[in-house]
Amino acid sequence: MRILLTGATGFVGTRLLERLAAAGHEVVCAGRAGGRGPAHCAAWAAVDFSAPMTPADWRAAGEGMDVVINTVGIFRERGRATFDAVHTRSPIALFDACAAAGVARVLQLSALGADDGAETAYHLSKRAADRHLLALPLDAVVVQPSLIFG
């Protein structure tokens, strides 16, 4: 399968990338770091989730993908890297691009607590993207793990 993995240089993304590549998948990586990206990436797309993004910004990166996996997330806001930008606006632009491109499956790494009882800006931002994704005409999965640390 051809997979677009966002957050490929992050804590979850790097581990997921290793496993996907070991399973024989062609992984196109997307993240902030410049250059080629991690060794297991078939290609690299430099994207900054804190920048204002539109579905058009994702068109080239998402073209020809069978699966898109979004693992991007932050625990605290810094500068323009806000919960709204990183967890809501940019993922929604990505998900809309996936729907337009006919991507077969989209997986969103969300957070435990990003549900109807959400109260914090962190959880509300994740919940907004989750709900948007699940309302699209896509085969979509939202994973809500507990706090991940290492």
Image: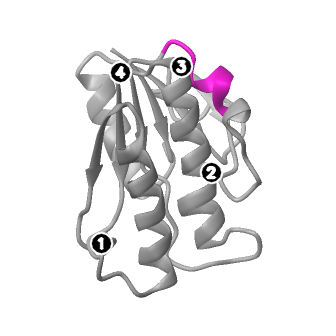
What colour scheme governs how the chains and residues are painted in the rendered image of this protein?
A: one colour
Label 4 sits on a secondary structure element that is: loop
Report which residue position mark 1 lands on: 115
- Rendered location of residue 114, percent (x, y): 34, 71
The amino acid beneath tag 3 is Ala
Mark 2 or 1 closer to N-term? Answer: 2
Report which residue position mark 2 lands on: 90
Label 2 sits on a secondary structure element that is: helix
| Front-lying residue, 139 or 62 | 139
The amino acid beneath tag 2 is Ser
Q: Residues within 10 Å of mark 4 (few under 14, many from 20)?
A: some
Mark 4 or 1 closer to N-term? Answer: 4
Question: Is 100 left or right of 48, judged from the image as shown?
Answer: left
The amino acid beneath tag 4 is Ala
Report which residue position mark 3 lands on: 101
| Front-lying residue, 93 or 147 | 93
- Rendered location of residue 128, percent (x, y): 47, 63
Quarter of the image where one finds residue 63:
top right
Cβ atoms at labels 4 and 1 below 8 Å apart: no
Q: Residues within 10 Å of mark 2 (few under 14, many from 20)?
A: many
Q: Residues within 10 Å of mark 1 (few under 14, many from 20)?
A: some
Which mark, by number, is residue 104? 4
